[in-house]
Image (cartoon, grey):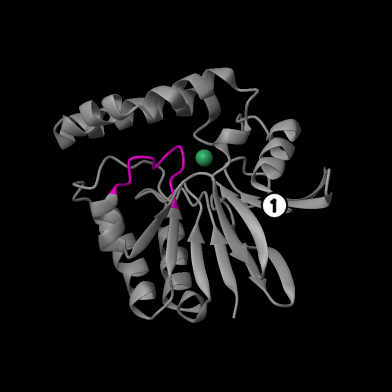
Amino acid sequence: MSTLFLSDLHLDANRPATTQAFEALMAGEARHAEAVYLLGDLFEAYLGDDDDDELPARVATATAAVRASGVPVFFQRGNRDFLVGPDYAARAGWTLLPDPAVIELQGEPTLLLHGDLLCLDDTGYQALRRQLRDPAWQTGFLAQPLPARRAFAAKARAASAAAQSGRDESIGDASPAEVRRLMDLYGVRWMIHGHTHRPALHRVPLARGEGLRIVLGDWYTQASVLRVDHDGLRLEHAA
Ligand code: MN
């Protein structure tokens, strides 16, 4: 049985085929997986657990059925869906993971991150991240009525689209020094993350030998899935 890792699906009502591809994976292969890990930016935007839109309801239905079939589903918040809270996680059958989190994968301690924490060169983003992760800011935002939050998200998206054509292509890459620092700090040889939309397997020189950093791809134009089982790991992209 494989363990599945996905990130950066950026599910959005404007790209229904991506949502259908995710639902198909959850209705099929995921039901027979060892576990499913969703490493953030599952949603293009997330406005709060009280959002009654169709998309979050569909996603919760899809993953709750995976959980109900006996397969654990883990979720790590990304920079797009950092407002996912315990209510939605319960509905969706998710176990929330901190970022970063260490898991045991085929006997190998493995560090999981969304990945934005690694992009230290983007100081503007890191400052924004500190603001958006501030509990006081989040409480204030979630206290606004849904229409106001939707308007805020639409404005933020328009600004982001103007700056980067709606994609995350302009996001910086992971800092190699930060990758090594965190792998040493947590005592792992394997790291898995998304966020940068640069799917690849990287060798990482560590004091304790060679490490491996696996970067998941996005789902804008492909369906990037990492499968890990006792035979090894496969990072694959279905068109
Ligand atoms: Mn991201």
Q: Looking at the picture, does residue 208 appear above or below residue 90? A: above
89 to the left or right of 99: left
Q: Quadrant of residue 100?
A: top right
Q: Residue at x 27, y 54 (%)?
A: 88
Q: Position of residue 107 (x, y in %)?
A: 67, 69
Between 75 and 26, the residue placed more toward the observer is: 75
Magenta-drawn stretch contains 43: no
Dot 1 amino acid type:
Val
User: Would you identify the image quadrant in which residue 67 lies?
Assistant: bottom left
Side of 169 relative to 71 (left or right):
right
Disc 1 residue crowd, few under 14, some 14–19, many 20+, Cα 10 Å: many
- The residue depicted at 50 percent of the width and 44 percent of the height is 99
Which residue is tagged 1? 188
Q: Residue furthest left?
A: 145
Q: Quadrant of the C terminus?
A: bottom right
For numbered disc 1, what is the local secondary structure? Answer: loop
Percent coordinates x, y for residue 124 in the rendering: 53, 18
Residue at left 59%, top 47%? 194
Residue at 65% x, 23% y: name it. 121
> Observer-nearest residue: 191 or 32?
191
Q: Magenta span covers which residues?
A: 76-85
148 displayed left or right of 38? left
x and y percentages locating residue 59 in the rendered image: 34, 61
